[in-house]
Amino acid sequence: QMKKQCDQKLLIRMKTECVPCSLNLNTQCPAGYTKITNGTGIPDCRYYLEIKIHTLSFPGCRHHCVKEFEQPECCQGHWGPDCMGK
């Protein structure tokens, strides 16, 4: 019995919203995602504050998150919803 289904492992990456670094300690990744940065995260972004008629931008931090995702795929040479076609 040859394996006809070869699932692909996909890594989905995302970054949380940019916030003041001091507030970023408690930022959580969305459900299902794993945080791969620690502490206050990575200071690689800017966040914006609107003050009256001005919009000011400040350096901020965000976390990077990943999620592993199995995508069902047929092995080479097989096709169809059940991978039975040759």
Image: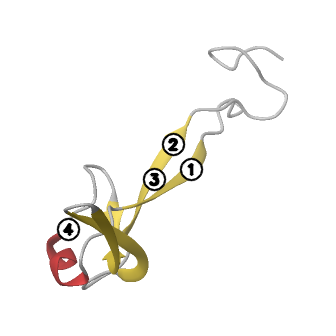
Label 2, label 3: how far apart the Cα atoms are: 7 Å
Q: In this view of the protein, which residue sits in the foreground, 3 or 13? A: 13
Q: Which residue is mark 4?
A: 27
- Name the residue type under label 3: Glu
Label 3, label 1: how far apart the Cα atoms are: 6 Å
Q: Which residue is mark 1?
A: 10
* Location of residue 1 (image quadrant): top right
Residue 49, given in percent of the width and then of the height, sits at 25, 67
Label 1, label 2: how far apart the Cα atoms are: 6 Å
Residue 59, given in percent of the width and then of the height, sits at 36, 82
- Name the residue type under label 4: Thr
Which mark, by number, is residue 68? 3
Q: Residue at x 29, y 66 (%)?
A: 54
Which mark, by number, is residue 70? 2
Q: Marks 1 and 2: CB-CB under 8 Å?
A: yes
> Is 45 placed above or below 13 here?
below
Which mark, by number, is residue 64? none
Residue 64 as seen in the image, left or right of residue 40? right
- Name the residue type under label 1: Leu
> Is 69 placed above or below 51 here?
above
Q: Residue at x 45, y 53 (%)?
A: 68
Label 2, label 4: how far apart the Cα atoms are: 26 Å
- Name the residue type under label 2: Glu
Query: Image quadrant for the C terminus?
Result: top right
